[in-house]
Amino acid sequence: MTEAPVSPFTFNTTASIVFEPGSAARLGEIVARRVGNRVLFVTDPGLRRIGLCDEAMASLQGAGLTVMVFDEVEADPSRATLMKAVEAGRGASGVVGFGGGSSLDIAKLAALLIGSGEDLDEAWGVGQAKGPRLPLVLIPTTAGTGSEVTPVSIITVGEEEKRGVSSPILLPDVAILDADLTLGLPPAITAATGIDAMVHAIEAYASRSANNNPLSKMLAREALRLLGANIEKVIDNGQDRDARGAMLLGSMLAGQAFANSPVAAVHALAYPIGGTFHIPHGLSNALVLPHVLRFNAPDAAHLYAEIAGDCFPALTGEEGVQGRCAAFIEELAALSKRVGLQTRLRDVGIGEDALSKMAADAMKQQRLLVNNPRAVSESDALAIYRAAW
């Protein structure tokens, strides 16, 4: 039996990746030549308050750079926050994003808007951003979004709607992966962000995107191997530096995978949960994950069966495609419960009367739904939400 020919694809990722415990403390040494002499440092008030940014900022200043700090990023950041960051960064020669996915998303678009002066409303969507952007360095403090290697930034517009800018221009020049920055993460955030990274790998592997490619598939499988083997370790012992590093690396690999083979219905159905009810993104994904995979199984069982053993080695011996697929989905649902996440929409305060509007809102995410292995109608979305409720 001959292998099917490889379809044409494009693979973009961050130009330089530094994986090293303690590397944030020598940030100036690593990036000074790339970012110029006036840096906009984007982070959130919590990280600033606990001093997690201090060493990185001191290192930039020690290298002779002026640091302009914007520390007002909130979860699911708004357009207003982005515009405040842009104003704070006027005159900057480069941007450093430090924090979770929200801070990195703001840093990406601030670098674009300051560097190009373009209108945000003309940049929404895929491939619409013109650039250029300012030099950009991203430093994640959670092992979840993979934003340091993705060309996407998500912003909350108005009260509830989330919109994205997706363009290779947003890929940073440097990603700094410092496991020491994640040692203090609380178990709930560790769990939610870890499941988020697993969702990225699963959806990238099974994506119906024409750009699904062998590199993304390989990266997704290695991501699941690292994440599956370490997520419960870091919940049990948050100071396990090796396990924290493995989670950070797994998150990045999953980010590289879905940056090039985009995510699908899990994310599309998670967005109304986050946008309307302000549930953290990773938890929003976890709440619908098993239900979307069960819906997809008629068309994607063979794909889920292929990756089941990567994530959960005990499933390697499960007989048959259908058996491995079903066991994989049940094990993911059980994992969410084991790591302490809520598992039903009602558990996070979502009433049954909200499900119809959520289903309608999920249909606005066509840029994601087109990648799903099985077509999703509004009635399908509603049925999935009901199963998750």
Image: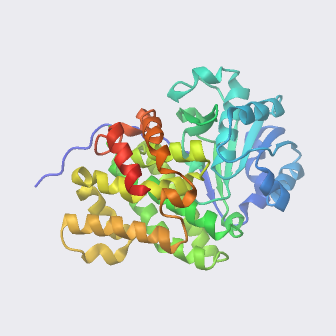
Report which quarter residue 11 is drawn in. Answer: top left
User: Is residue 216 among the parts visible in the rendering?
Assistant: no
- Of 74 and 20, which appears nearest the observer? 74
- Of 222 and 37, which appears nearest the observer? 222
Quarter of the image where the N terminus is located: bottom left
Numbered disc total: 0
Q: Which residue shows up at 26% across the image and 43% down it?
A: 6
Q: Which residue shows up at 33% across the image and 70% down it?
A: 309
User: Is residue 20 among the parts visible in the rendering?
Assistant: yes
- Of 225 and 288, which appears nearest the observer? 288
Q: Which residue shows up at 42% across the image and 45% down it?
A: 263
At which x and y percent is residue 311?
39, 68
- Is 228 left, or right, of 313 in this rendering? right
Quarter of the image where the C terminus is located: bottom left
In this rendering, the answer to whether 109 lies above or below 306 is above
- Is 281 left, or right, of 111 in this rendering? left
